[in-house]
Amino acid sequence: MNGTGDRNSKRTDFLEWQEYFMAVAFLAAKRSKDPCTQVGACIVNDDNVIVGIGYNGMPKGCDDDAFSWAKKSQNRRDNKHLYVCHAELNAILNKNCSDIKGCTIYVALFPCNECAKVIIQSGIKEVVYMSDKHAHKCNTIASKKMLNAANVKYR
């Protein structure tokens, strides 16, 4: 259907590119085994071709059952933050092309400072995010400071 019920003309109720790529990021997040936070990322080039997808999870070869998924733990070694690779990092490492300079990354949650470093170093020039729920935290403030200094746009 085309949004008006007319089967003889093109549809008008299709997803725009930005909605589509964000939906892919959210779909990728469903692969995460993290019980608290599921984040996905989708990297797209100027031709609207997906060149990388990732989600937050344990590094390749690390058994998901052998590591803690605890967000906070009395024993700091059992804190998931020591082990989990973020969606942005996985999308960049899992890219299917040699160069992602100038690309855009779509991500559900505004990137942390560590992911901002990787985004900047990879040459990605724009971050499109859905939520900035940690805007008040130091690592998000640092992330924005670095992205601004490196002329990486975010919206």
Image (tube, grey):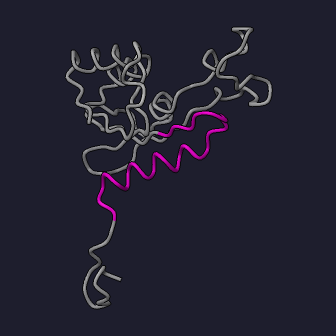
Q: Out of 48 and 13, give the one closest to the viewer.
A: 13
Question: Is 76 displayed left or right of 151 in the figure?
Answer: right
In the rendered image, the vertical position of residue 96 relative to residue 135, given as above or below: below
In the rendered image, the vertical position of residue 17 relative to residue 94, given as above or below: below
Q: Position of residue 11 (x, y in %)?
A: 29, 78
Q: Position of residue 25 (x, y in %)?
A: 46, 45
**The furthest residue to the right:** 66
Q: Quadrant of residue 97?
A: top left
In the rendered image, the vertical position of residue 101 relative to residue 29, given as above or below: above
Q: Quadrant of residue 8?
A: bottom left
- 17 within the magenta span: yes
**Residue in the picture at 75% in, 22% down:** 67
**Residue in the picture at 32% in, 90% down:** 7
Give the residues drawn in magenta, as a range: 15-40
**Residue in the picture at 34% in, 44% down:** 44
**Residue in the picture at 40% in, 43% down:** 51
Q: Quadrant of residue 150?
A: top left
